[in-house]
Image: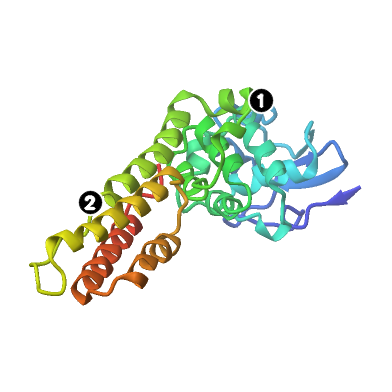
Amino acid sequence: MSVSTTFHPAAQTRGLSPDVTFLTQDNVYFYVHSSILLAGSTNHFGGLIPIDSSEKSTVKIPEIAPVLNIILHAMYNMSCTAYSPTFRVVQWAIELFPTYGLEVKTYIAPQTPLFVHLTSFAPLYPIDVYALAAHHDLEDLATVASTNLLSYQLSDMDDALVDYIGPLYLRRLFFLHLGRTEAFKRILFPIPPPHPATAECDFEQQKSVSRAWQLAATSLAWTARPDMSPSSVESTLASLTEHIECGECRQALKDRVKDVVVQWAFVKTTI
C-alpha cells in the first residue's frame, strides 16, 4: 500500500481536511475532498460519492493510480507535469472524464493546467493530440496541434484514426494542407515585372528571365508541400540570379523572391 504524494491525509484545501479516501486498483490511497469532487462532477463522481455523506469513507476506484492522479489534478485545477505522465496515460484519463461526470471542455479549456500540459505533447505527438482534441471538439487545442502537422502524411491515417477524428476536423486538416499548397502556387507563379528596355537589356532579352522564373516556379509547384520552409523557397529561387548579367533584372528577381518568401511566411499554418 502507498499514499499519493499530492493527495495525502494532511492535504488541506480551502481550510478543509480530506473526507473521502480513494483506493485505486494498484493499491494507492488518495485523500480527497467531497466538496470539490461534487462541485466538479455532474454525476457524483460516477456515483461513488453520496451528496450528503457526513462520514469519512474509503471508496475503491477501478483505475490505476497514474490515471486517477490526472483526473484529480484536473478537478483541483492543478498541474500534473511533476509526475511526467505519458501522453497515453493522459489520454486514458481524459477518456474517463465522462465516466466520472467531468465536462471535457471545462477541464481542458485554454490556460487550464491540463490544456497547457497537452500542448507540450503537440510537437512530439501532433496527430495524437489533434485527434484527441478533434474527438472532444476542443478547437483551441486542435489549432495548437495542427501547426505541427504540416509535414504529416495524411495518407498514413488508418480507418480507426479517421473515425476517431471525425469528419469536421478531418476536413479542416485536409483543407489546411490543400489550402497552403494552393496558396503557395498562387504566390509563386506571377513572373518578375520587366524593367524599361535599355541598350544592354531589351524586352526580348528579359523574356529569358521570365522563362527561367516560370521553369523554377513550375518545378517548385510540382513538389510543393504544406511544410515548405521560407528559407528553402528562397534558396531555390535566389539561385536564378547567378547567371543574369543585367543588374536591373537581377534586382527585379531579388525583389520578387523576397515578395514570395514574405507572402509564404504569412500564409496560415493552423486550421
Q: Is residue 220 above or below residue 20?
A: below
Q: Which mark is residue 25?
A: none
Amino acid at dot 1: Gly
Q: Position of residue 55 (x, y in %)?
A: 73, 37
Q: Secondary structure at mark 1?
A: helix
**Between discs 1 and 2, the one toward the N terminus:** 1
Q: Which residue is mark 1?
A: 47
Label annotation for residue 190: 2
Q: Amino acid at mark 2?
A: Pro
Q: Which residue is nearer to you in this view: 138 or 9?
A: 138
- Please rate how many residues cluster around mark 2, counting C-alpha atoms within 10 Å: few if below 14, some from 14 to 19, many from 20: some
The one of 69 and 257 positioned closer to us in this rendering: 257
**Which residue is pictured at 45% across the width and 49% down the height?**
110
Q: Residue 186 appears in which quarter of the rendering?
A: top left
Nearer the viewer's eye, disc 1 or disc 2?
Answer: 2
Q: Nearer the viewer, residue 3 or 197?
A: 197
- Answer left or right for 87 relative to 136: right
Work out whether 216 lies above or below 175: below
Relative side of 105 to 188, left or right:
right
Q: Is residue 208 left or right of residue 18?
A: left
**Does 52 appear above or below 32?**
above
What is the tally of numbered marks visible in this picture?
2
* Res. 46 visible in picture: yes
Where does the image place residue 104, in percent across and percent down from the top left?
53, 36
- The residue that appears at 55% across and 43% down in the rendered structure is 152
